Every structure is written in structure tokens, then in C-alpha cells.
């Protein structure tokens, strides 16, 4: 497994410089005073991934964590599959360097660690669907214990219990949605970077600085990983990476305060930012149930078909880079709608923006159906 030494030495030099420039003075202090702390954390995380991704590929070769080609795989050559190790360590390095830990951030770090270890073991040894679902639920419950949960349910009867239950369902769903999207080179890492940047922008614009800092750390890790994950990928995220990214994004959706006086905006903002993964998992789940492909949660977790949105676009003739680019652009459109909706004063304007988002999803449905028709015998 060859490692780009020049790029590795450059990344190491940048990372050491960023970590060594402690306040007072230096780039770190300057980002504080100029209100650009997020950029510092983004650079730390991205530089760390540049350094750690080749090392992760080397480790994968040593322990046999290799993804071999098969009929349900898109790649044609064996590829290391524990790139999530680099993303996880880079993300944690940025958070630790920031030295700002609220109760919720501790929960995110602990829950994220559970998800990463679970994914790493699955990439390395293979775990059953029941084991994965159990520990995903444990990680989600851990986050709720540290105070991260849906807030709009708390005023209802049994509000605390309902909030925790819905938060767990949300987190487990987003974890698996991102895992299902990790089917072609660069898609999950690119989507992770885009969604995290959208949360970063909204958080910074609304003075939610802890939210922006966590988002910047994740965005930098995902953006840095694209260097080795773009087609042809030299390393895959694996479950350790895709589930970890999905989990942190799900936590960010719970962490943010999206609107205090407009339930429609508060509810729709995270749904729009994470719109494409959410739509993909719902559409394919309903489709598989209708077709009889899955009949239980176990079969749902284990099923590996080529019926996701990215697969359908490729059936329409798009290449891997074009497919990734198209999906990213759609998600940016939805995310910008989520950003704009927060600054819309009129109720009519809010509902018009939501209607626009619905039309985007209808376009996705049409593309899914067209992609289905390309393959004879495939049901919707």
C-alpha cells in the first residue's frame, strides 16, 4: 500500500503548526479575535485526515480489513475499508484542541465513539444485524442521557420519555441512512462535508458557536477524506466512517436551536439539510417492503441491493463523479432553502420555500422511477 510521503509530510507540518500555535498569539488566537474559530478547527481536522488516511490504509492491509469486489459492489479492485478511523481521530483531535466541552458535547463524543468502535469491528470481523442495532441504540440513548433530544415533545404527556424514544429512532435512522448511501466512491464523505457545512453556516449565522465548532470539525474531516476517497477510491469509509458521520450529523440536528417561535421552521430545517439521505432510506425501505425483499428489521439491515438513489442515477447513464456531484447539488439546494427559510418573515414565504423543497423531492422520485425502468424486471 503506497503512501504519498510528500503529501503526508506537508499535512504533518500543517497539523503541528496549527496545534502548536497556542493563545496568546498566533493563528489560533487570531481566529478567536476575528470570529473565525470554525476555520481553525476545520483546518486541524482536514490536515489530520490527510495524515491519518494513508496510515489507515496501511493498517487495513495489515489486519485484513479489505473490501473485495463482488456482484453487489461497484469497485473492481480490493480497497481498504477502515477509513473511518482517520475521520474519527481527526474529528476528535479538533474537538479536543478546541477545549470547549458542554454536557451535550461530551455526549456526542461518547456516543460517537461507541458508533465508531461498532463500525470498526464490523469492518474488521463482521457483526450481526442484531448486534449493530443494539449498540446503535445504546449510543443514541447515551446522547439523550447527556441532554441531547427533541425539544418540541417535552410539553406533551410523558414528554421526556417520548422525546428520548423519538430521538433514538431519529439517530438510528440517520446512522443507517448514511451507511446505505456509502455505495459509490466519494458520496458519503462529500455529503457529510456538505451537510456539516450547512449546519456550520446556520449555526454561525445564529450565534450557536458550539454547534458551529462541532460542525466545522466534521466538515474538515469529511472534506479531507475526499482526497483519497474520490474515484478511484484508494480507501473506503467503511461502516466505521459512514455510520460515524451519520451519527454526528444526527446529533447536530438535535443540538441546534432552529427556531423558537416557528414550529414549521424548527421542524423542517434539519430535515431539509439531511433531506437526500432521509428520502433515500424512506423510499428504498417502502419499495423493498412492497416488493417483499425485506420482512423484518434484521433483513432491512442486512439487505444490500442496488436500488438506492445513486444506483438509479448510474442506471440512467451518469458516471460516479457525475452522480456524486448531482446528489450534492440537490442537497445544497435543499440546504440553502433551510438557511433561507429562517430569515423569511412572512408565513406565506415559509410555505412557498417548503413547497419548493417538495418539488425537489418530486424530481428525485421521477429520477428514481426512471432508473427503475432501465432495469427490466425491477419493481418500484
Image: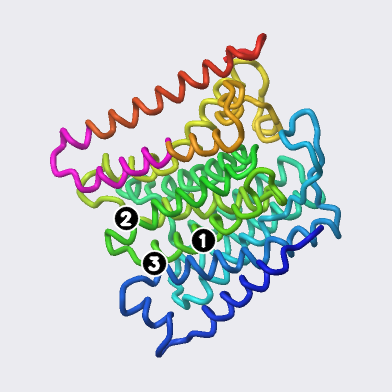
Q: Position of residue 67 (x, y in %)?
A: 79, 44
Query: Whole-Å distance between the Cαs marked 1 and 2?
Result: 22 Å
Q: Going by the image, does 126 lie left or right of 288?
A: right
Front residue of this view, candidates 161 and 230: 230
| Residue shown at the point (64%, 52%) measured from the top left | 241
Q: Secondary structure at mark 2?
A: loop
Q: Position of residue 276 (x, y in %)?
A: 47, 36
Q: How crowded is the residue under tag 2: few (<14 C-alpha within 10 Å), some, or many (20+)?
A: some
Q: Height in image: 280 above or below 290?
A: below
Query: Whole-Å distance between the Cαs marked 2 and 3?
Result: 11 Å
Q: Which residue is mark 1?
A: 220
Q: Secondary structure at mark 1?
A: helix
Q: Secondary structure at mark 3?
A: helix
Q: Going by the image, does 164 lie left or right of 184?
A: left
In the image, residue 344 lies in the stretch drawn in magenta: yes
Q: Position of residue 336 (x, y in %)?
A: 33, 43
Q: Which residue is mark 2?
A: 257
State which mark lies toward you, 1 or 3.
Answer: 1
Front residue of this view, candidates 282 and 325: 325
The mark found on residue 210 in the picture is 3
Amino acid at each position: 500500500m503506497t503512501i504519498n510521503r510528500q503529501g503526508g509530510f506537508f499535512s504533518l507540518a500543517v497539523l503541528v503548526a496549527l496545534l502548536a500555535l497556542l493563545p496568546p498569539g498566533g493563528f489560533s488566537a487570531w481566529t478567536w479575535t476575528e470570529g473565525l474559530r470554525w476555520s481553525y478547527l476545520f483546518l486541524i481536522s482536514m490536515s489530520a485526515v490527510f495524515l491519518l488516511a494513508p496510515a489507515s490504509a496501511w493498517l487495513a492491509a495489515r489486519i485484513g480489513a479489505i473490501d473485495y469486489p463482488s456482484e453487489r459492489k461497484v469497485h473492481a479492485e480490493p480497497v481498504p475499508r477502515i477509513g473511518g478511523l482517520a475521520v474519527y481521530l481527526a474529528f476528535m483531535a479538533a474537538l479536543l484542541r478546541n477545549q470547549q466541552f458542554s454536557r451535550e458535547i461530551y455526549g456526542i463524543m461518547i456516543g460517537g465513539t461507541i458508533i465508531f468502535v461498532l463500525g470498526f469491528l464490523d469492518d474488521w470481523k463482521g457483526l450481526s444485524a442484531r448486534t449493530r442495532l443494539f449498540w446503535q441504540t445504546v449510543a443514541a440513548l447515551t446522547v439523550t442521557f447527556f441532554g441531547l433530544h427533541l425539544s418540541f415533545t417535552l410539553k406533551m404527556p410523558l414528554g421526556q420519555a417520548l422525546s428520548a424514544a423519538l430521538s433514538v429512532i431519529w439517530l438510528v435512522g440517520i446512522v443507517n441512512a448514511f451507511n446505505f448511501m456509502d455505495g459509490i466512491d466519494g458520496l458519503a464523505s462529500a455529503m457529510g462535508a456538505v451537510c456539516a457545512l450547512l449546519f456550520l453556516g446556520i449555526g454561525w449565522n445564529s450565534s450557536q458557536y458550539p454547534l458551529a465548532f462541532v460542525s466545522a470539525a466534521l466538515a474538515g474531516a469529511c472534506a479531507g477524506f475526499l482526497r483519497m476517497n474520490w474515484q478511484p477510491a484508494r480507501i473506503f469509509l467503511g461502516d466505521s466512517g459512514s455510520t460515524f458521520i451519520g451519527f454526528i450529523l444526527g446529533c447536530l440536528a438535535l443540538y441546534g436551536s432552529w427556531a423558537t417561535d416557528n414550529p414549521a421552521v424548527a421542524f423542517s430545517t434539519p430535515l431539509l439539510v439531511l433531506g437526500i439521505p432521509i428520502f433515500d432510506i424512506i423510499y428504498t425501505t417502502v419499495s423493498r417492503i412492497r416488493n417483499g425483499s425485506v420482512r423484518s428489521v434484521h433483513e432491512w439491515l442486512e439487505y444490500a441491493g442496488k436500488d438506492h438513489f445513486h444506483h438509479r442515477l448510474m442506471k440512467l447513464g451518469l458516471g460516479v463523479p457525475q452522480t456524486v456531484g448531482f446528489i450534492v447539488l440537490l442537497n445544497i439546494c435543499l440546504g440553502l432553502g433551510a438557511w433561507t427559510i429562517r430569515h423569511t418573515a412572512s408565513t406565506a414565504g415559509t410555505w412557498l420555500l417548503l413547497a419548493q423543497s417538495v418539488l425537489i423531492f418530486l424530481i428525485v422520485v421521477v429520477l428514481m422511477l426512471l432508473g427503475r425502468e432501465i432495469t427490466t424486471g425491477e419493481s418500484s
